[in-house]
Amino acid sequence: MSTTPLHPSKAADTATFDRVESQVRSYCRSFPRKFGRAENATIFDVDGRAHIDFLAGCSSLNYGHNDPDMRAALVDYITEGGIAHGLDMHTDAKERFLATFEEKILKPRGMDYRLMFTGPTGANAVEAALKLARKVTGRHKTVAFTHGFHGVTMGALASTANSYHRGGASSELAGVDRAPYDGYFGDGIDAADMLAQMLDDPSSGFDKPAAILVEPVQGEGGLNVASAEWMRKLEAIARKHGALLIVDDIQAGCGRTGTFFSFEEMGISPDIVTLAKSLSGMGLPFAMVMIKPEHDIFGPAEHNGTFRGNNHAFVTARVAIEKFWSDDAFQKEVQAKGDHLAARLETIADAHGFSTKGRGMMRGIDAGDGETAGKVCRACFEEGLIIETSGAHDEVVKVLCPLTIPRAQLDAGLDIVERAFAAVCGKGEARDAAE
Amino acid sequence: MSTTPLHPSKAADTATFDRVESQVRSYCRSFPRKFGRAENATIFDVDGRAHIDFLAGCSSLNYGHNDPDMRAALVDYITEGGIAHGLDMHTDAKERFLATFEEKILKPRGMDYRLMFTGPTGANAVEAALKLARKVTGRHKTVAFTHGFHGVTMGALASTANSYHRGGASSELAGVDRAPYDGYFGDGIDAADMLAQMLDDPSSGFDKPAAILVEPVQGEGGLNVASAEWMRKLEAIARKHGALLIVDDIQAGCGRTGTFFSFEEMGISPDIVTLAKSLSGMGLPFAMVMIKPEHDIFGPAEHNGTFRGNNHAFVTARVAIEKFWSDDAFQKEVQAKGDHLAARLETIADAHGFSTKGRGMMRGIDAGDGETAGKVCRACFEEGLIIETSGAHDEVVKVLCPLTIPRAQLDAGLDIVERAFAAVCGKGEARDAAE
Amino acid sequence: MSTTPLHPSKAADTATFDRVESQVRSYCRSFPRKFGRAENATIFDVDGRAHIDFLAGCSSLNYGHNDPDMRAALVDYITEGGIAHGLDMHTDAKERFLATFEEKILKPRGMDYRLMFTGPTGANAVEAALKLARKVTGRHKTVAFTHGFHGVTMGALASTANSYHRGGASSELAGVDRAPYDGYFGDGIDAADMLAQMLDDPSSGFDKPAAILVEPVQGEGGLNVASAEWMRKLEAIARKHGALLIVDDIQAGCGRTGTFFSFEEMGISPDIVTLAKSLSGMGLPFAMVMIKPEHDIFGPAEHNGTFRGNNHAFVTARVAIEKFWSDDAFQKEVQAKGDHLAARLETIADAHGFSTKGRGMMRGIDAGDGETAGKVCRACFEEGLIIETSGAHDEVVKVLCPLTIPRAQLDAGLDIVERAFAAVCGKGEARDAAE
Amino acid sequence: MSTTPLHPSKAADTATFDRVESQVRSYCRSFPRKFGRAENATIFDVDGRAHIDFLAGCSSLNYGHNDPDMRAALVDYITEGGIAHGLDMHTDAKERFLATFEEKILKPRGMDYRLMFTGPTGANAVEAALKLARKVTGRHKTVAFTHGFHGVTMGALASTANSYHRGGASSELAGVDRAPYDGYFGDGIDAADMLAQMLDDPSSGFDKPAAILVEPVQGEGGLNVASAEWMRKLEAIARKHGALLIVDDIQAGCGRTGTFFSFEEMGISPDIVTLAKSLSGMGLPFAMVMIKPEHDIFGPAEHNGTFRGNNHAFVTARVAIEKFWSDDAFQKEVQAKGDHLAARLETIADAHGFSTKGRGMMRGIDAGDGETAGKVCRACFEEGLIIETSGAHDEVVKVLCPLTIPRAQLDAGLDIVERAFAAVCGKGEARDAAE
């Protein structure tokens, strides 16, 4: 790529957006281009310029943009007049998805869950999961964690930790007792033991919870990683106190960490799992709640929604599973790519005295503060790389590229990241610059 | 059609659904077939049998299943590699939708709104609208109405009146003062005057609301119709007390009542309008909040969501508007069809001493009780008609067919309804039977 | 009395109050004197001037200030070293009160209740009653009424209708569905039938309540009077829907309406009754919840409080009951006095085109607006009468004198009221003046 | 005292209580006698038997039962016809209290507060404090602590940690973020630093609080003692984040810890202080909120209550302050007595391998578990000593005797405690027995 800026921000004509769209729009501010086509890890703007996508729809595009097999299957489905909207009626597309998910995902992992299709957003899946946990237990409180992100509808938002999003409620958010995530208080302090103490103590002020709601990796919260041991402790705490363990695998699931579920090698068995984002495989709106059979007690339509069960998504989601999860080839490839990503990020971080965070293909560099991380991302975008920050202070430069990104393009993107850090932080003087 | 049942319930093999899908599934219980293809008002099951669709995705398919133009545009878009998932970045597909909506919908109606793309469910749009109204006003309570339905996520559910859905929260639903809908207490009593009295009275116990949230026609609530005068009173009450008027046009909008917005001939100017269901035109998940410019005060991503701005839906929604709303031909056709529907339902209802309800192409027969209405719907399904009930007691047999249904098919469907009422209620003896 | 103002406001030295007491103080603003002694219906300021008391501690002094028998008994008790503070231990004073209340109040009325001594405020009794009703029913919502007043602690305040007091919470007040009080929507509309319709309707948005909480006469709300028929309807509604009927008799009880309980001739049997204010007889802090035996299910100290069971109050409350409720003489006297009061108020009201409100010795004149009523009260105070307003707009001039007030003093006070109305409203020109 | 049980539980005739009083009664179950008179630290049952009072109305009787000077003043006041109930009007009794409190308590300590008289319960004072803090800050959340006890009305109860009392709400308790009290997580962990981290972190899930509500010593929570350093940290956190610091000194105040306020030697300046319990001096219901002048922003009667400003209590409270707080003699006596108490409890605890807790005259022995502590208290009562447990598991035997208890009687009581521990735990074998 040329070193002259390929993507001057003035180029895009955004008058229509400025005139008609709400101020709530956000990513378009970081990436002020007008985009048209996309293929795997490349997004093209309407002027034909290619951008490497290290954001991937916030992990909604684990298999890249417009996977050819999914695209072909979806085009065939539409062309044949397949039902697009069928409420929650039985459809052929749904049946094939159910059978495939059972066969390729659940059975090989020895998992037994019922699948609930909620409104096609992660937040809706979280809302359903929380409602169900309260119905199962007859309790109303949930334990959620520092830096957790679970969506911004009122039920989910009460569990979300971020104050900017919480403030958007302009109302009291109730029903959650907040506990520290793994490592929150530093190395010497076991956050799970703290939660255990609070729940064992009848006078701690923590109520017996309906559920403990946790992300094995906190994507929005800054790529914080929970250890398997910590997750097992959470499970034990939940069991001891009659609470359900809900794993929110919306961002970390669907292969992002190297296995289909981010928790599957942790030796835990969640009562409820939420999935969305990459579940459809092609970025179509789709969400699902996995429920242990004994907890599958919602009455018909007790939680409902017009778009529950998106048939287009059933088609692409089935193809995604058949294509990528029929054997362990993809999983091994992702793990290897994740190791490579880790190594390269370590090198970049070390050069500036920063540290890396994350797991699998969900990794980033903690740049110390949001200003630095923001400058790095802007510098990347000038070179044609779409990349974002996360964390409480937006201090983590986060790589969430498609898992299917070609190795060369991954390296090209990381080269841009490396140059951007150097440009922003100087050579090995980052710490000083940041302080 | 033959009078022998075309659709014996035993025919469908639902073993996969029974084994893998959650018990929460609902419509599949009323229509125990396995469906595959669909075209306009006809749904085909996998055995090739045709069903007339008088449910239309609960008004999500106002333009029928798989409109050929939308389908073609979507296939083209996918084939060309158009971006499916772009978060809320600027995309070509979004820009074209914005421009079209502005040109064909807003301008001709003299409306000035900013469009906010929320998570692609009606509930999410309602959540965003309520949060915004609270932010604008600095208040936390909302007025919502008897028989209102606004979704089942916690913020929306607090406004939803139905006790079955409310019970699903297994938690306290706060923040709503409940007012009677137009006509709720019978003819002599003006429900808007009651609300006015409550809000004028500093000791009524009703708090000054952030918003008054209302559906001009209550679809789920039993096809209750608000008069224009009543809606104008609500607007005046909202203005007087500094509350925003939020019109939830999710089910009644997009042409269902004969005009694009159900309220556009009422002489009101809502502060916020929510749209979803038929907005995408083809049944794809899509939702939008229309906001008066002066209230467009959310910060970037203050309300967010991974699937906000579904690009496939931008494509089909644009085609829907261009095709059906470029002139008044479709509107007139719908109005005429609605009159025809009204007349035929009147005849059927009269024959059994029942009454009709609704407006435009959103009409039904109040069968007095849920048992009768349920029997009628089951009898209809035996003859190949998909139709559902609504109302507090599921007592209304509700016709929500595509607005694009051919006249002959509409009549064929209504013939089935007529026969079903006769079979269930006898000839003109309904009242006796029901009592 | 002289016609020259006896009580110029400048006389009292309130420097200490101004310097040390909080701005929240209130009645001292209406009656800017410094008071010292009091006897029956007369309060003396420190300068020795006598004021007639038509406020009576907001009905906390039904037997007047410093009844000689209560005073003597209390002095004896203190002198003998009787326990003042005994938590909820068994004390002699409590036992004697329990036995007397059982013998003189419960038995003659055929009532069977358990007595719970809460923290010695009416609000605390209401809080306990609501908590108990939720525990008994397993539900969380309460129905409360327009213009109801039940205290300002958070649980009670949610039921209180007044917006000024509600605003003092600076927080969301949840858990209450608000229903119109008897007559709220005017003569033609039966407010109880409305509530019945809301609760019968599974889609009204009203949740099945734990309790219906009602004052038979709304003292703070403006002397609104519920009819016996309406109260019986409420009881029937409560029974039908499995809710408890809680009668808040804090202001209207203890003889204020002419019988010990304000509801005892209504043919109802509340599940819970709250009492406070005049229960101690002498104005000492004291509150009680009466509970039907089958609902007496709080565990030991599940609702507690340091000052539950004020032993000084047990002593005076016992004397009050023995002295005034051993036979029906006092009751008859109060009823006769109430009739007299009613007649005189009618005359005054009629002279100015106003109407009267209330029941028994809890009556007033609706002066149309708060400004007029306030002027009347200020004019009264200039003549040595302590009297206050109530109602949503402070529009009711309220007579709450001791039930024991001598007839001549009652008339003297009413003469002042009459003159004040004449002075403020002119002679029979009130309506014009108010408009 | 004799070793034969002086107080067989069968002796008291409790039939009236059993028949008429609610099951919620509690302390009478631990001390099943019927009590009549009391004097300083001695309570006499109706059969004339003397009991030493180590409970003192849960610290409501710091100056003992029926102090002769208070008693005399109160009898005089009543005899002279002093106003008992005056709402919040200016009374002579109130003025004298205000002036005395200002002169003897505030001025010598360099404190500037406005005094608000709430409903006469500690819970009511806490409710008022929380409402005020929300009004001042415009925020709705409060930080409260593990093992905190602040009362059981809904607003206060949300802050109370004890699950038994919280359960009594039978409803969701919202508005509180729970933080660990000083020492909660053990020696190495600074609980204030944790809170600081949570509030500094915009994505912790803790909302910016209106107030931090804390007891310097947690009486009900198990005699947990906060260090001055920790309290200063809390104050600094509150200041940094714009929250008010509310010190709940209801149980620990009024001299219990050796100074009038429990925090006065800590170098902090709370925004709000709540007092109740021993404030009246004689156990009369009385509560007060001290407010920094700049926060004194409640409107007139915005928080109100019929019994705010108990005039009998004004009289006795004034005498208490004049008598005990005019110089430092009492304070020194209490401190010396507290040291003695500490030493004797250490000896007893050491003998059984237990530890002591508390501060000043608010101390106890942690008996390891509730069963042991309960046995000790029952054994004490058999010997004529009234003493109770506290703590999350009722595991602390708590000495809360009057501060005025004669040294000999204190020792007599402690002898009983010592014998009871020996009887229950054996000689030095406690740890084994408890395990």
Image (tube, coloured by chain):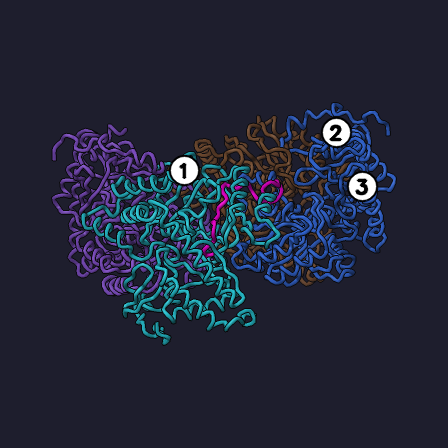
Chain colours: A cyan, B purple, C brown, D blue
In this view, the residue in front, A112 or C319, is A112
Where is residue A332? Give x, y as percent.
39, 50
**Residue name at image x 26 percent, y 47 percent:** A85
Viewer-nearest of labels 3 and 2?
3
Residue, disc 2:
D33
The count of marks equals 3
Where is residue C135? Give x, y as percent.
54, 35
Q: Which chain's residue wears label 3?
A: D
Q: Magenta segment range?
A: A199-221
- Same chain under badges 1 and 2? The reply is no
Q: Is residue C109 above or below residue A142?
A: above
Q: Which chain's residue wears label 1?
A: A
Viewer-nearest of labels 1 and 2?
1
- Same chain under badges 3 and 1? The reply is no
Residue, disc 3:
D345
The answer to which of marks 3 and 2 sits earlier in the sequence is 2
In this view, the residue in front, C315 or D205, is D205
The amino acid beneath tag 2 is Arg
Q: Indicate the secondary structure of the residue bearing disc 2.
A: loop
Residue, disc 1:
A110
The amino acid beneath tag 1 is Gly
- Same chain under badges 3 and 2? The reply is yes
